[in-house]
Every structure is written in C-alpha cells, then in structure tokens.
Amino acid sequence: PPGTQPRPSGGGVHSPARAAIAAPHLRTDRWWLAPAATAAGLFAFVVYSTWRAFANADYYAAPYVSPFYSPCLAQNCRTMHAGPNADLFGSWWAISPAIIILIFPLGFRLTCYYYRKAYYRGFWASPPACAVAEPHKKYTGETRFPLILQNVHRYFFYAAILVAGVLTYDTVLSFRDQHYRWGHMGLGTLVFLVNIALIWTYTISCHSCRHIVGGQLKHFSKHPVRYRAWRFVGRLNAHHMLLAWLSLASVALADFYVYLVASGVFDDPRFF
Ligand code: FES
C-alpha cells in the first residue's frame, strides 16, 4: 500500500512480523523522560547504597541501627543492640555487615516485577518505552539464561519477609532512649515508623505475594479468608510502583538519618 516500505528481514525491530513502517516509532511525546528519570533515580540509589554499604561505619546511633546493616552481624553490635543484632559471625568477620545482609533486600528488588520493567527500560532500552522499538537485534525476553534467573523472585519474597520482620523489631527498639530505657520517642523513631510502614506495604504488594495468597484456587467461594487477603493484596498491588519508589527513598533516608546522628552532625531530638 502507499506510504509503506518493503518488509525488512531479521529479528527484533527487523522482524518480518512488525508492521512495515519506516520510522523507528511514531510517538511524538517526550517518551524518553520516564526511562531517563527512572535510570537517574536508580543510579543515585546504587551510588548511595554502595558508598554506605562499604563504609562499614556510622551505622549505629543508640537506639537506632541503620536498615542497611540490620540484622547487624558485626561484633560491636552485640553490646550496642540486643536481640538478633549480635555478632553471629564472631569477630573474625572483617567485611562490612551490610554486604552480607543487603543481598536479600537487593535481590528482592532486583528481581521485582516493577524494577525489572524499570531497569530494562531505563538502562537496557529493552524496550525503552511502550511502542518504541528496542535497538537490539534479538529479543528473547526472560526465557534464557541469565534472565530466566529472575524467577527466583518468589524465594526472595520469603527472605524479604524475614528482613521486614527484623526491621520491625528495630523499630520497636527505637522506642528506647540512648540508655535503652523504654517509653521514649525521637525523630529517628518517626523516621523508622514511616520506613517500616512503607517496607511492609511494598513487600506485601508484591506480585508473588498476591499469587501465594490467592493463586492456584479453583473456587474463591470456598476460601473466603484467602479471597479477602487476595483482594487486600490486590489493592496494594495496584500501587506497587509507587510503593517501590517510596520505600526505596525511605530506607535510604532512614540510613542517612542514622549516619547523621552516628557521625555527630546532630543529636537525635527526643519528643519524650
Ligand atoms: Fe515487586 Fe515482588 S513484584 S516485590
């Protein structure tokens, strides 16, 4: 027909199945803005978290332990912080405790359905946006190694539940003062409360969680409790992207707060 080009051969953009249009895409809006902003945001978090994870310092300011370092397996956490934050690995362990722990929450986020979309678009341009063809010649999706490993996400979900449990414990401990007396509250307690609320809502809004709660059922009518739980998770799941960003920001902020107090920039204001 007039205005069309002969069909190119090859894979991806050059697939014979693609409409025979010469232009790489027909979008005229600023479609590149979202992937560019996503890449910038993720890059900023990677830089910040790498710096903090390797710092191996300023991660504890009584009664707060940084979420990047919790459960804290360093030797000096034993005296500072009772409970799971003890030196399980003994004093021979010289690497920053954050390196051991961060693999779980980072693995959870790296394999998250939303983050996958975000970094496939932002960093790999695969594809960069809806209706914008990717530059690569071939597209195999997540059917081959290494991307097929993204399927471990469901197992990272269980690890993320454990990590969220530990961070909840840390938040409870933040109701103590610097001398570990209960019944106190500081600005850091508020920061921790907001962070743990966002961590839990992000974790529970996970697509794997939705499947675990309500998947593989033939009749919802025979499982009213699971049905209600599935509906609840589903409502949260609709906001998964927003929760992913908010919890990413809040966990960095909680760590930064601990860093500021631990490094002596200011004292934690106590409300009571
Ligand atoms: Fe995002 Fe599971 S899909 S955390």
Image (tube, rainbow, N blue to C red):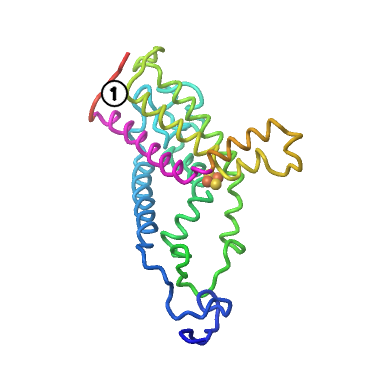
- Name which quarter of the figure residue 183 lies in: top left
- Disc 1 marks which amino acid? Asp
**Residue 118 in picture, x, y percent from top left:** 45, 55
> Which span is picked out in magenta?
238-264
Q: State how many labels appear.
A: 1
Residue pictured at 35% horizontal, 59% vertical: 33
Residue 81 figure quarter = top left
Instruction: Report helix, strand or loop for mark 1.
Output: loop
Dividing the picture into quadrants, the one containing residue 170 is top left
Query: Residue 155's spot in the image, x, y percent?
Result: 61, 44
The residue located at (40%, 37%) in the rendering is: 251
Task: Please say whether residue 247 is one of the residues in the magenta stretch.
Answer: yes
What is the chief secondary structure element of the magenta stretch? Answer: helix
Relative to the observer, which residue lies in front, 135 or 144? 135
Seen as rendered, the residue at the extreme left is 265
| Residue occupied by mark 1 | 268
Along the horizontal axis of the image, is 90 left or right of 152? left
Q: Looking at the image, is 32 positioned above or below residue 228?
A: below
- In which quadrant will I find the C terminus? top left
